């Protein structure tokens, strides 16, 4: 619950009430957009919980709220869609977070969520999905999710419209530094993702085809622990 709350409210007042402290060196987000300008992926942040004595590493992405009709271009042509029937957008999408050095990874979770500006009663993607990790190690974690969209509405409802990876880690050694990077992979038509390999040097997204896909990486988040 605490980890989920971290992605919903990061005001200074709320953090102080929860005894949470931003300890990474990225107090403000810097956006990195794909070449299609449809998605923003943010620098990972690190928060310290003084009660639990645990650190939360959080990576986030969000599709552009103005993407609108562009989502229709990604439909799997083999899918049959009608009013309020979700269609697969190619194969699975993927999201991953890695560390530049091995950390003690206590728990890794993800939230893939639908649009927050959809108010229709029949919006199926108002909630979030939390699939298990595809890969999970001391180097980080990756997750896969089949993305779906409603084809016949003015504002397409997209089940992976935004997402957050949350990894609970032990503290790094005194006077040491770790960098954190995230990467998102998107597919359409008949392309999918078979795996995402996470290491301290790179995130490798294994696509099933060479076409109809892209991936984008965040800028680095930096965490230095002074003791």
Image (cartoon, rainbow, N blue to C red):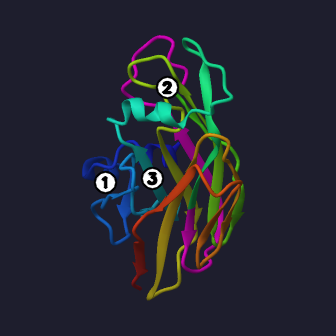
Q: Is residue 157 visible?
A: yes
At x 44%, y 88%, the residue is 175
The residue that mark 1 highlights is: 16
Q: Nearer the viewer, mark 2 or mark 1?
A: 2
Contact, mark 3 vs mark 1 (Cβ under 8 Å) = no
Q: Is residue 185 visible?
A: no
Residue density around tag 3, few if under 14, some if 14–19, many if 20 or more, within 10 Å: many
Q: Nearer the viewer, residue 120 or 99?
A: 120
Residue 42, picture quadrant: bottom left
At x 44%, y 17%, the residue is 153
Give the SS element for disc 2.
Answer: loop
Give the SS element for disc 3.
Answer: strand
Q: Is residue 113 magenta?
A: yes
Q: Nearer the viewer, residue 148 or 108?
A: 148
At x 57%, y 32%, the residue is 75
Q: Residue furthest bottom?
A: 175
The residue that mark 3 highlights is: 60
Q: Nearer the viewer, mark 3 or mark 1?
A: 3
Position of 188 relative to 182 (above/below) = above
The residue that mark 2 highlights is: 126
Q: Give the CA distance from mark 3 to mark 1.
A: 22 Å
Q: Main secondary structure of the magenta part?
A: loop
Contact, mark 2 vs mark 3 (Cβ under 8 Å) = no
Q: Give the CA distance from mark 2 to mark 1.
A: 29 Å
Residue density around tag 1, few if under 14, some if 14–19, many if 20 or more, within 10 Å: few
Position of 20 relative to 220 (above/below) = above
Q: Nearer the viewer, residue 76 or 20?
A: 76
Mark before the other along the chain sequence, 2 or 1: 1
Q: Is residue 2 left or right of residue 27?
A: right
Magenta segment, which residues?
A: 97-126
Give the SS element for disc 1.
Answer: helix
Q: Is residue 165 magenta?
A: no
């Amino acid at each position: 619950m605490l980890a989920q709350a971290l992605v919903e409210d990061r005001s200074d007042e709320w953090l102080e009430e929860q005894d949470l402290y931003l300890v990474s060196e990225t107090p403000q987000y810097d956006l990195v957009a794909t070449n299609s300008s449809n998605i923003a992926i943010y620098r990972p942040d690190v928060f310290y919980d003084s009660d639990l004595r645990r650190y939360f590493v959080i990576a986030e992405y969000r599709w552009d709220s103005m993407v609108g009709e562009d989502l229709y271009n990604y439909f799997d042509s083999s899918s049959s869609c009608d009013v309020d029937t979700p269609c697969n957008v190619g194969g699975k999408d993927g999201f991953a977070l890695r560390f530049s050095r091995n950390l003690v990874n206590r728990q890794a979770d993800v939230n893939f969520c639908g649009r927050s500006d959809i108010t229709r009663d029949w919006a199926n993607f108002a909630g979030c999905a939390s699939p298990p990790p595809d890969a999970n190690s001391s180097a980080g974690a990756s997750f896969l999710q089949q993305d779906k969209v409603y084809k016949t509405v003015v504002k397409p409802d997209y089940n992976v419209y935004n997402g957050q990876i949350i990894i609970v880690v032990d503290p790094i050694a005194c006077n040491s530094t770790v960098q954190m990077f995230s990467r998102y992979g998107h597919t359409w038509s008949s392309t999918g993702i078979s795996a995402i390999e996470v290491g301290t040097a790179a995130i490798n997204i294994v696509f099933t085809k060479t076409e109809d896909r892209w991936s984008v990486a965040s800028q680095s988040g930096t965490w230095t622990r002074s003791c």
